[in-house]
Image (cartoon, rainbow, N blue to C red):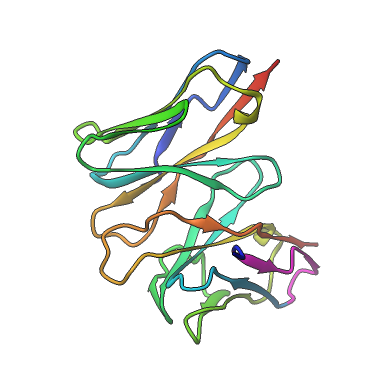
Amino acid sequence: GAGVSQTPSNKVTEKGKYVELRCDPISGHTALYWYRQSLGQGPEFLIYFQGTGAADDSGLPNDRFFAVRPEGSVSTLKIQRTERGDSAVYLCASSLRRRGQGGSGELFFGEGSRLTVL
Amino acid sequence: QQPVQSPQAVILREGEDAVINCSSSKALYSVHWYRQKHGEAPVFLMILLKGGEQKGHEKISASFNEKKQQSSLYLTASQLSYSGTYFCGTEIQGAQKLVFGQGTRLTINP
C-alpha cells in the first residue's frame, strides 16, 4: 500500500514568508507526528496528533509554528514569518497507535519536505 | 530528555561487528531503533519495551537494560547495506512523544 506522502518535497522561500507543508499518512493510522531534522542531527519532535487533536505540541519552537489535522487524516504544518533558522527537513510519520496506548509503536516516516529560507 | 548515543561514528570493514549505545537520564517505557540512509526517511528496525528484553532481526539485535535506562544495538558480520545513521528513540512512561538521539553514523567498507 501507499506510504506516508509529504508535499512539497522541496520548498525555497524568502525570509518573512508564510509556508505550508502537507502530510498524508498511511490510511487507517490515527497517530501522526511532525519532526524537524537539521543536517547531521537526529529528528527533533514538534507535535503529535491522535485523531484530530494535538496530544502533545510541546516541541513547537514558538508561536510562528502551527499544525492542524481537521479530519483526522491529512495534516498541515504552517510556519509564519519564516526565518533562516527554520531551514531544515520536516519529517512526518504515522503509526497505528491508539488513544490511551502506552507507546507509539512503529513509526512510518515520509520522505520529508526540505525547507530552505533565503 | 534527549537520549545520548555513543559512539558518534563508526567505520568498519565488511564482516566486522559493531555496538551502538543509547542512554537516558529518565525512566523509560520503550526504546526504538531506526536506520536512515543519506537523503532517505528513517526506517524502523525494532522496539524494546521495559522488562529488559532482547530482540533480534537477522544479524541485528538489541537489548534494553531497564535499571540503567540503557539500550544497545548489536550488528554482527556487518554488510555493506548496513551503512547509514542509526538513531535510538526513547519514550518515557506517560509521555506522548518519541525523542531521538543525535545518531551514530556507521560506514561499512569492502
Q: Residue at x 51, y 81 (%)?
A: A69
Closer to the camera, A24 or A114?
A24
State the extent of the magenta-drawn residues as a range: A4-17
Q: Position of residue A78 (x, y in %)?
A: 61, 76
* Residue A101, above or below B28: below
* Residue B96, above or below B12: below
Closer to the camera, A81 or B41?
B41
Q: Taking the image as drawn, is residue B12 in sight? A: yes
Q: Position of residue A75 (x, y in %)?
A: 56, 76
The part of the image, by quadrant, that contains residue A58 is bottom left
Q: Residue at x 51, y 64 (%)?
A: A61
Identify the image quadrant of the N terminus of chain A: bottom right
Query: Is B35 colored magenta in this rendering?
Result: no
Closer to the camera, B15 or A16?
B15
Q: Position of residue A38 (x, y in %)?
A: 63, 49
The part of the image, by quadrant, that contains residue B110 is top right
